[in-house]
Image (cartoon, rainbow, N blue to C red):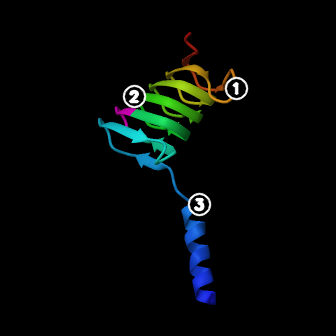
Amino acid sequence: MKPTTIALAFVCVALAGTAAAKTYIDNEKTVAQDCSKDPEATIVGNGNKLTFTGTCAAITVAGNENTVTIASVKVLDVPGNGNKVTADATDQVSVPGNRNQVGWKKGLSDKKAKLSDSGNDNKISQPK
């Protein structure tokens, strides 16, 4: 194999491993994402309705007043404000934002998700 062919193959493999999170910057949109195709998402827009199917690696809800429904996510981070987020399963929930409603039904890998709530006036629950 020629050195240029080897170098090109290396660059292609390196770029394939650097997929970025899909970012939603629009406002007042209804969106669905299949996490088997795009495993990470960042929401910076406001007033959106988003649905995530499959198992997501990470979802960050940095925008405000979004309604987010998630099948399963390993790491959920909600630094935005006034969001309503529900997940069927998750391993980790972090809520540094304020006035958010976050709920999940079960742990993804473990029985219980790890929780961090450093924001104010959040309602975080694990409904039965």
Say which element carries label 2.
loop
Task: Say few, some or many: other residues with alpha carbon within 10 Å of mark 3 (under 14 / 14 to 19 / 20 or more).
Answer: few
- The residue to which callout 2 is attached is 65
- In primary-sequence order, the first of circles 3 and 2 is 3
Residue span colored magenta: 46-50
Going by the numbered disc 3, the residue's amino acid type is Gly
Task: Say few, some or many: other residues with alpha carbon within 10 Å of mark 1 (under 14 / 14 to 19 / 20 or more).
Answer: few
Relative placement, left or right, of 43 versus 59 is left
Of 105 and 114, which appears nearest the observer?
Answer: 105
In the depicted structure, whether residue 125 falls above or below residue 5:
above
In the depicted structure, whether residue 43 falls above or below residue 12:
above
The residue sitting at 59% across, 68% down in the picture is 13
The residue sitting at 49% across, 44% down in the picture is 36
Q: CA distance from mark 1 to mark 3?
A: 27 Å
- Residue 17: which disc? 3
In the depicted structure, whether residue 71 falls above or below residue 12:
above
